[in-house]
């Protein structure tokens, strides 16, 4: 019984760290739009920070308060929904409605595959994705990633 309590406490702490960290990343991904001058916005540190994970093409990025976001529309969906997943986990923790790890992994792989197909079909000119299709697939992938991280083990017993 004591071991279950310790595991639960560690899980709660790690979820809190993930919630704060992912929320901070999602806010930073919005870019410098809310506080930087228009002239200096394009040279801001946000773009350098996220340049190693995102192409940041202006034609594929939303604007936030008249400045380009630090990431593209797909990445802002991933970061935002990833953080949202941890918030939802915190709000629904008492209800024990979170899916099993196997179900979460299935959804994660589904949306990973759909995102890959979207990128491939766009590259092959089979279909042209839009800001919103990239945002939707990115958000689905990000939410499923956080769902997978916080999902319960299918073999654990409720007490």
Image (cartoon, rainbow, N blue to C red):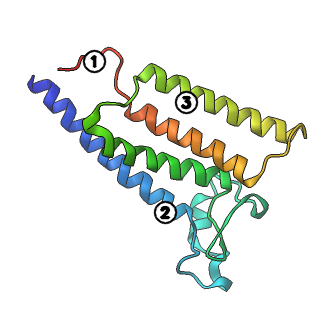
| Label 3 Cα neighbours within 10 Å, binned few <14 / some 14-19 / many ≥20 | many
Point out which mark residue 108 bears.
Answer: 3
Residue farthest along the left direction in this orientation: 2
CB-based contact (under 8 Å), mark 3 and mark 2: no
Q: Is residue 155 above or below residue 85?
A: above
Circle 1: element type: loop
Instruction: Locate residue 6 relative to residue 39 in the image: left or right.
Output: left
What residue is shown with label 2? 27
Q: Is residue 117 above or below residue 133?
A: above
| Label 2 Cα neighbours within 10 Å, binned few <14 / some 14-19 / many ≥20 | some
Q: What is the x, y in percent for residue 93?
A: 28, 38
Q: What is the x, y in percent for residue 64?
A: 62, 70
Instruction: Locate residue 123 relative to residue 21 in the image: left or right.
Output: right
Quadrant of the rendered image containing residue 92: top left
- Alpha-carbon span between mark 1 and mark 3: 21 Å
Given residues 75 and 81, the one toward you in this image is 81
CB-based contact (under 8 Å), mark 1 and mark 3: no
What residue is shown with label 1? 156
Circle 2: element type: helix
Q: Earlier in the sequence, mark 1 or mark 3?
A: 3
Q: Earlier in the sequence, mark 3 or mark 2?
A: 2
Q: Is residue 99 above or below residue 25?
A: above
Q: What is the x, y in percent for residue 25?
A: 48, 57
């Amino acid at each position: 019984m004591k071991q279950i309590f310790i595991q639960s406490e560690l899980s709660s702490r790690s979820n809190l760290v993930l919630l704060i960290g992912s929320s901070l990343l999602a806010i930073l991904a919005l870019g410098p739009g809310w506080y930087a001058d228009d002239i200096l916005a394009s040279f801001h540190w946000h773009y350098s920070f996220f340049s190693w994970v995102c192409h940041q093409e202006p034609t594929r990025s939303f604007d936030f308060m008249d400045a380009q976001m630090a990431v593209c529309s797909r990445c802002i969906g991933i970061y935002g929904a990833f953080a949202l997943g941890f918030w939802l986990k915190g709000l629904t923790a008492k209800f024990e409605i979170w899916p099993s790890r196997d179900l979460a992994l299935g959804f994660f792989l589904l949306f990973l595959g759909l995102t890959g197909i979207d990128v491939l079909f766009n590259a092959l000119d089979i279909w042209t994705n839009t800001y919103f299709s990239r945002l939707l697939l990115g958000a689905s992938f990000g939410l499923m990633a956080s769902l997978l991280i916080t999902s319960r083990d299918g073999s654990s017993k409720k007490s």
